[in-house]
């Protein structure tokens, strides 16, 4: 299993193929996903990239964090495990 990266501040017209192509310059991309609104199908402005190895993910993160797509600097960071994100969400709802 590869290492997942969170990619934020994506242009709304950017697709998975564009995202994958940009990150492929820095290693083997296992998967690329742009998260879309379930009702409209429109991009929500963020996605995930899975790189083959942790080293490739670190290289890609360093090279792509701040890279501009359509004059929008993207943010790249290590993706949080899904259960960690859920816990944060649950905590926020109680307060």
Image (cartoon, rainbow, N blue to C red):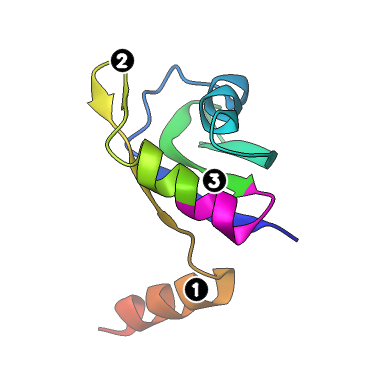
Check the image and report above or below for 66 versus 72: below
Task: Find the magenta span and give its range.
Answer: 51-58
> What is the x, y in percent for residue 24?
60, 30
Sequence order check: which comes first, mark 3 or mark 1? Answer: 3
Give the alpha-carbon distance from disc 2 to disc 3, as whole Å: 18 Å
**In the depicted view, which residue is nearer to us: 48 or 61?**
61
Graded by Cα atoms within 10 Å as few (under 14), some (14 to 19) or many (20 or more), the crowding at tag 2 reads few
Sequence order check: which comes first, mark 2 or mark 3? Answer: 3
Q: Quadrant of residue 7?
A: top left
**In the depicted view, which residue is nearer to us: 1 or 26?**
26
Sequence order check: which comes first, mark 1 or mark 2? Answer: 2
Instruction: Residue 70: give its label.
Output: 2
55 drawn magenta: yes
Give the alpha-carbon distance from disc 3 to disc 1, as whole Å: 17 Å
> What is the x, y in percent for residue 36?
53, 35
Seen at 68% across and 39% down, the residue is 28
Seen at 53% across and 28% down, the residue is 19
Marks 2 and 1: in contact by CB < 8 Å? Answer: no
> Which quarter of the image is occupied by the N terminus?
bottom right
> What is the x, y in percent for residue 12?
40, 23
**Disc 1: which residue:** 86
> What is the x, y in percent for residue 61?
42, 47
Instruction: Residue 48: give its label.
Output: 3
Seen at 34% across and 77% down, the residue is 93
For numbered disc 3, what is the local secondary structure? strand
Answer with left or right where residue 50 lies relative to residue 10: right
Check the image and report above or below for 37 versus 76: above
For numbered disc 2, what is the local secondary structure? loop
Q: Quadrant of residue 71?
A: top left
For numbered disc 1, what is the local secondary structure? helix
Marks 3 and 2: in contact by CB < 8 Å? Answer: no
């Amino acid at each position: 299993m590869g290492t997942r990266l969170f990619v934020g501040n994506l242009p709304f017209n950017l697709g998975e193929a564009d995202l994958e192509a940009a990150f492929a310059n820095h290693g083997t991309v296992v998967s690329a996903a742009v998260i879309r609104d379930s009702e409209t199908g429109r991009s929500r402005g963020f996605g995930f990239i899975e790189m083959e190895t942790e080293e490739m993910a670190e290289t890609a993160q360093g090279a792509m964090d701040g890279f501009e797509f359509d004059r929008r600097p993207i943010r790249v960071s290590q993706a949080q495990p899904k259960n960690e994100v859920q816990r944060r969400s649950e905590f926020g709802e109680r307060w």
